[in-house]
Each structure stands twice: as C-alpha cells, then as structure tokens.
Amino acid sequence: IKRIGILTSGGDSPGMNAAIRAVTRVGINSGLEVFGIYNGYKGMTEGYIEPLTRDSVSQISNRGGTILGSARLPEFKDIAVREKAIKQLKKRGIEAVVVIGGDGSYRGALSLTEMGINCIGLPGTIDNDITCTDYTIGFYTALQTIVEAVDKLRDTSNSHHRCSIIEVMGNRCGDLALYAGITCGADIVITKDTGFNEADVLDRLRELDTIRKKKHAIVIISEKITDVDEFAKKVSLNTGFSGRATVLGHIQRGGSPCPFDRLIASQMGEKAVDLLMQGIGGQCVCIRENKIVSYPIEKALKMPSDSRKPLTNLFERLI
Ligand code: ATP
C-alpha cells in the first residue's frame, strides 16, 4: 500500500494525539503517505481529508483532545453513506485507515474493511470499556485527574464531617471508579459490578461514623447508576455525615496525557501501521499483559468483560 488515512471518532481521550503522531511518523518513515481525516466518519463522508506531514504532527503528544477533531455520525451504519465515504477515500488513493475510538468506531471500521478498505482500530477512550485490551488510551490520564480531584475533596470533607460522593465516568465500565477507589483510599466504590443497594451503603456509612469514628467518608460511584444529588440528600438525612455530591464530568476527558498513555498510543500506532503494511485489516490493537497484540474486531467486540482480572478483591482487602 502507498496511502493510509487516520481518524479519531466517538468521545475524545487524552493520548489520541500521540497515536496520530505515531501513525503519521511511522507511516512516513515506512514510505507511506498519510492523510488526516477530520471529524471522524463525518469528515470521511464529506471529504474533509488532508495530507499529514512529519511537521504537522510535531508538538502534539503533550496536548489533550485530538487535532483531527471527533464527531458522531449515526448514519454511518447505512451502507449508502459508507459507499459515499469510500468514494472520497478512493478519489485520493487512500487504501487503508487507522480508526482511533471506542467500540462504535470499531464497528464502523469493521464494516469498511468488509467493503474493501482495510481498517485497524486503536482503543481511544477514557472509559477502559474495550474488553480485549487491559488499558485504553486515555484511561490513566483520566484516572490521574480523578485522583487529584478526590485528594482535594478529601481535605475539605475531613474538615466538615462530610461524606463526599464522587461520580466518575466509565460508560458502564467500573474501572475508573475501582482504580480510583484503590488509589485514593475510598471507603466505598459503587459500579455496575458491585451493584447499588442504597440501604446497605447507608448502613456502611453509619458504621464508619459511629463505630469507626471516621471524620469523613469518600464514596466513588460510576456514572449512570443513580442520581448522586438525591443520594447525597439521603446520606445527610440517614447518617451522621453531611452528604455532598460532586460530578466530575468532562474534566476527566481533558488534560495533557500522562506518559503511560503517550507510550501505549505510540506503540499501538506503530502496530497499526505494521498490520496495514502486511495487508491486514479488520483488527484492533490491544495491550495485554504488557504486550502489544491485535485481535479480529469481530472477536474483540464479543469478549466478555470478565475476561480481565478485576481488582475488586484488592479493594475489599484494603478497606
Ligand atoms: P465512545 O466509547 O467514546 O462512545 P465510540 O466509538 O463507541 O466511542 P460511538 O458514538 O458509539 O462512539 O461510535 C462512533 C461512530 O462510529 C458513530 O457515530 C458512527 O459514525 C460509527 N458507528 C457506530 N456504530 C456503527 C456501526 N454499527 N456501523 C457503522 N458505523 C458505526
């Protein structure tokens, strides 16, 4: 192959730029021409595609977000829309594409591969909700943001006998909450895997207050589980703590990527180019037990989430 494209799709994550840089530089150094496709599949369909040079990707590894922009285009499920996108690629001689995004983006990549454009997926999301990989690009940066925020909340909760209830992202994957719970020394972690029994949690908080005589309590809860403001009111009414909810929100998606995210983004970008040069498509790149590997997207999307070792037991042993 001679020409490849790269795009970022779905929610952005810190480290996407390092992946764009890696794909561009490794591609160019391997004799390929590399094109940036702006705003995900939307830009592909509209032909918003421009050549990337060695210099156009300098000084971006340290920046959060994505220089290529991201977008959602639900119509990409429609074959006629994908045909239009493929025309735009063919017009420019682009034969293969690296797609950085989440599982929805992977589905788009698989459909394009089935239509003759080899695509490789890279896991770009803070949520760590792509089962086949131990870590997604952006996860550790988001974790760092959460830890910094929780450390600050702990100081003020401690002074006011509060229970801080902190809602973190994860899109139904509990990893951000669980890893934050372990690294911040939270008292309670609530995720899809732990389930949420309100009465039990209130019991545990009362115990922390009256038996353990704690000055404050930290509860970390995944998004999409309950209304944390309502829950905070119940904590104030039913325990000795004053309940305060904090929804960290999109702050978790920003910031300069941490070294680990930059590193795996670079390694995964390299792997993607190598696969495309071997004529391979329809695969996604993962890090598993410290090795950069790839799996067919079809298989990766069907992997059960318990195929990874969760740290739930460790959290329980630390409290
Ligand atoms: P995040 O984890 O941040 O939500 P994502 O990649 O899962 O990222 P989605 O919005 O689900 O985000 O998907 C991104 C884009 O991928 C969609 O807007 C759409 O253009 C394309 N896409 C999603 N599902 C499919 C599908 N089944 N077939 C073709 N394209 C798809």
Image (cartoon, grey):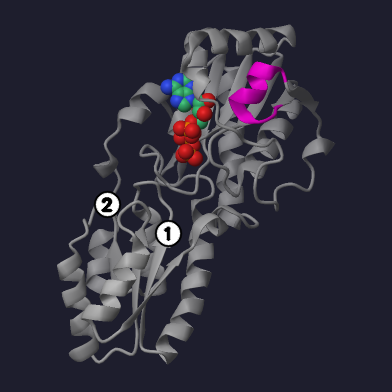
Relative placement, left or right, of 129 versus 278 is: left
Residue drawn at x 71%, y 17% as measured from the top left: 47
Above or below, 134 against 117 in this view is below
Q: What's the mark number on residue 250? A: none
Question: Based on the displayed image, in which of its 4 quarters is residue 197 positioned?
Answer: bottom left
Residue drawn at x 66%, y 7% as measured from the top left: 87
Above or below, 228 against 296 in this view is below
Mark 1 sits on what residue?
Answer: 168
Picture coordinates of residue 107 (x, y %)? 44, 23
Question: Based on the displayed image, in which of its 4 quarters is residue 219 positioned?
Answer: bottom left
Residue drawn at x 34%, y 47% as measured from the top left: 172
The residue stretch that appears in magenta: 37-47
Residue drawn at x 60%, y 49% as measured from the top left: 14
Relative placement, left or right, of 220 versus 2 is: left
Earlier in the chain: of badge 2 and badge 1, it is 1
Helix, strand or loop for disc 1: strand
| Residue 282 visible in rendering | no
